[in-house]
């Protein structure tokens, strides 16, 4: 192949590469939109996961995971359609190059046939005959050279088209491999979507069961609290304001257990999972397993029974309108009407729902709940 043929082949290959590069650089709008949506949803998912708190956030996170899986399927479908289009374009290019090659080969065959008509020895007889006959030698030489150049041009053309056809076939093969890869990726994405949907549905169902269970527990706790308020009304009405006024002891009462660690504080509490707000009228103090719970001050036992929602409960009237309550006891040592002294054991600390040894303590002035920590001695004193 001559220099001109090499140039033509290089140009054909460069054209094919430029077409392929252009096809690869231009991303269809549908595919770009799907990829942008995936990125946006993934960013939202990261934000939700970072700030995840409560049932609503969990549901949002699961629904986002499902949306991302669905969009990824659409993304893979768009990629597959794009790959199928590029395969079709490559096949059309290969077919066109085949047609052009066949035409070029036909022209080359005609050129060779023309030369054969002139004689087996090729173009030499034309020149020799011109020399012997005295005819126009330059004209005959020009014709011979023109025929030689045309034959070479036809051969170069055929070689260039052959190279183009090979490049087109190679491109078509690569595009078909890409199509197969996108098809496999689409299958994977669809399986991921099915698995994500099943997992999300199962987790949402579990969250709903948990929500209902906790809603029932919350309703039970609220109902127990209402009953406790009625009990307080009864106790305060029965005891009245008899006895010495111990409000002067505020900030100086002893702790009912050795530990001063507070597991739950007095006042409103927002449930981190459901966002509901409940009001706690006392504090939960940490205790040692089997530790005895003692009276914070001397007084008379007004109540000592099991109370639904609070477990074993002891209420001590300290005089005036000041009362202390000890809930969640594993057992009780006192009975109603019994007088107790400061530090006298009332019962044994029980365990909360998490299995931690603890005691629930309330301080009331009349029926008004007070923060026990403002009545007990400062920790460490």
Image (spheres, rainbow, N blue to C red):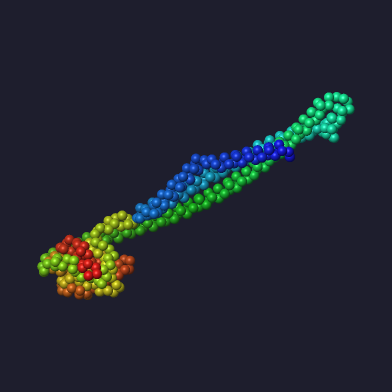
Quarter of the image holding residue 51? bottom left
Quarter of the image holding residue 168? top right
Q: Nearer the viewer, residue 282 or 379?
A: 379
**Quadrant assignment for the C terminus:** bottom left
Q: Residue at x 43, y 52 (%)?
A: 65
Quarter of the image holding residue 320? bottom left
| Vertical position of residue 137 compared to residue 37: above or below | above
Furthest-right residue in this view: 132
Q: Is residue 178 visible?
A: yes
Q: Residue at x 23, y 63 (%)?
A: 282
Image-based side of 22 in relation to 147, left or right: left
Q: Nearer the viewer, residue 124 or 248?
A: 124
Q: Residue at x 86, y 30 (%)?
A: 128
Q: Nearer the viewer, residue 196 or 143?
A: 143
| Vertical position of residue 146 compared to residue 257: above or below | above
Q: Is residue 313 visible?
A: no
């Amino acid at each position: 192949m001559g220099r001109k043929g090499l140039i033509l082949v290089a140009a054909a290959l460069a054209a094919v590469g430029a077409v392929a590069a252009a096809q690869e650089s231009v991303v269809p709008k549908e595919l770009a939109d799907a990829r942008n949506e995936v990125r946006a949803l993934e960013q939202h998912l990261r934000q939700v996961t970072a700030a995840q708190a409560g049932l609503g956030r969990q549901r949002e996170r699961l629904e986002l995971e499902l949306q991302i899986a669905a969009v990824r399927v659409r993304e893979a479908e768009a990629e597959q359609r794009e790959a199928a289009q590029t395969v079709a374009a490559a096949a059309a290019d290969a077919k066109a190059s085949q047609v052009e090659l066949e035409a070029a080969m036909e022209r080359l065959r005609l050129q060779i046939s023309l030369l054969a008509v002139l004689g087996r020895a090729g173009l030499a007889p034309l020149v020799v005959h011109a020399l012997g006959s005295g005819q126009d030698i330059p004209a005959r030489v020009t014709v011979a050279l023109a025929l030689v150049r045309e034959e070479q041009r036809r051969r170069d053309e055929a070689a260039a088209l052959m190279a183009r056809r090979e490049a087109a076939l190679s491109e078509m093969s690569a595009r078909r491999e890409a199509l197969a890869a996108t098809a496999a990726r689409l299958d994977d994405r669809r399986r991921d979507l099915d698995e994500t949907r099943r997992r999300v549905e199962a987790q949402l169902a579990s969250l709903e069961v948990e929500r209902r269970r906790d809603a029932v527990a919350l309703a039970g706790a609220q109902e127990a609290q209402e009953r406790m308020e009625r009990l307080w009304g009864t106790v305060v009405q029965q005891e009245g304001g008899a006895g010495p006024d111990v409000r002067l002891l505020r900030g100086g009462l002893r702790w009912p257990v050795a530990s001063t660690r507070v597991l739950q504080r007095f006042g409103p509490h927002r449930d981190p999972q459901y966002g509901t707000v409940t009001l706690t009228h006392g504090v939960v103090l940490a205790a040692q397993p089997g530790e005895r719970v003692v009276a914070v001050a001397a007084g008379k036992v007004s109540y000592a029974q099991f109370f639904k929602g609070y477990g074993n409960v002891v209420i001590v009237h300290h005089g005036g309108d000041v009362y202390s309550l000890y809930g969640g006891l594993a057992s009780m040592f006192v009975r109603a009407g019994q007088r107790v002294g400061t530090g006298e054991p009332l019962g044994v600390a029980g365990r909360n729902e998490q299995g931690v040894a603890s005691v629930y303590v309330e301080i009331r002035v009349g029926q008004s709940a007070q923060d026990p920590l403002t009545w007990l001695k400062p920790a460490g004193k």
